[in-house]
Image (cartoon, rainbow, N blue to C red):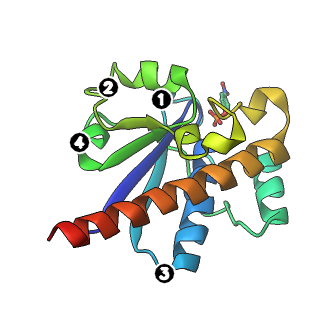
Amino acid sequence: MTHRILFVCLGNICRSPTAEAVTRAKAAARGMDLVLDSAGTGNWHVGKPPYALMQEAARARGYDLSPLRARQVLPTDLSDFDRVIVMDADNAADLASFGSTDRVTLFTEYAPSSGATYVPDPYFTRDFEGALALIEDCAEGLLDALEQQAQSNRSDN
Ligand code: 4NP
């Protein structure tokens, strides 16, 4: 069954759409079939494309964010997706008002060697390249974890 992953941040115009596009590109490069989406806990930017400076930083590293449009998290997301991956602890706390957070994990948990415990919000820090580099690390770690999981599922069967 195709694994379904939702990336969540606050506005869905900087970090989570970048996580979606970066993970999609890296999964395709590995030949992995995943369903990926992203959403925000807030509703300010619903229907808008990713933030222009975020798009620019992503494009410089080969990722096209332009087709993406912001949406707000739905309560059903928390059961429809196999994993819900948040950028920081506030996102996780905010998700609790949408439903069970059993499937929620922090993106930085997949990149322990980065030393980061959250993905800083470039909308406020203005460090778009730094956020992108961390997101790339986390995406590789996530895909490694999914490949390992698939391998151990295969050897269990
Ligand atoms: P994001 O960044 O959560 O990474 O999409 C934000 C963008 C905009 C706002 C907050 C966070 N805002 O409050 O408008």
| Earlier-in-chain disc, 4 versus 1 | 1
Give the Cα separation between the discs numbered 3 and 4. 26 Å
| Earlier-in-chain disc, 3 versus 1 | 3
Q: The residue under label 1 is which amino acid type?
A: Thr
In the image, 106 versus 114, the foreground residue is 114
What residue is drawn where x is 75% and y is 42%?
A: 131
Q: Ligand 1 shows up in which quadrant of the image?
A: top right
Residue position marked by numbered label 3 in the rendering: 31
Task: Where is residue 77? Give x, y as percent.
Answer: 31, 42
| Labels 2 & 1 near each other (Cβ < 8 A) | yes
Q: The residue under label 3 is which amino acid type?
A: Gly
Residue position marked by numbered label 1 in the rendering: 41
Which residue lies most toward the front here? 155
Give the Cα separation between the discs numbered 3 and 2. 33 Å
Seen in the image, is 31 located left or right of residue 119? left
Whether residue 4 is visible: yes
Task: Where is residue 155? Give x, y as percent.
Answer: 23, 71
Q: The residue under label 4 is which amino acid type?
A: Ser
Tag 4, which secondary structure? helix
Give the Cα separation between the discs numbered 4 and 2. 11 Å
Establish if 26 lies above or below 128: below
Q: Does the residue labelled 3 lie within 8 Å of ligand 1?
A: no
Q: The residue under label 2 is which amino acid type?
A: Phe
Residue position marked by numbered label 2 in the rendering: 98
Tag 3, which secondary structure? loop
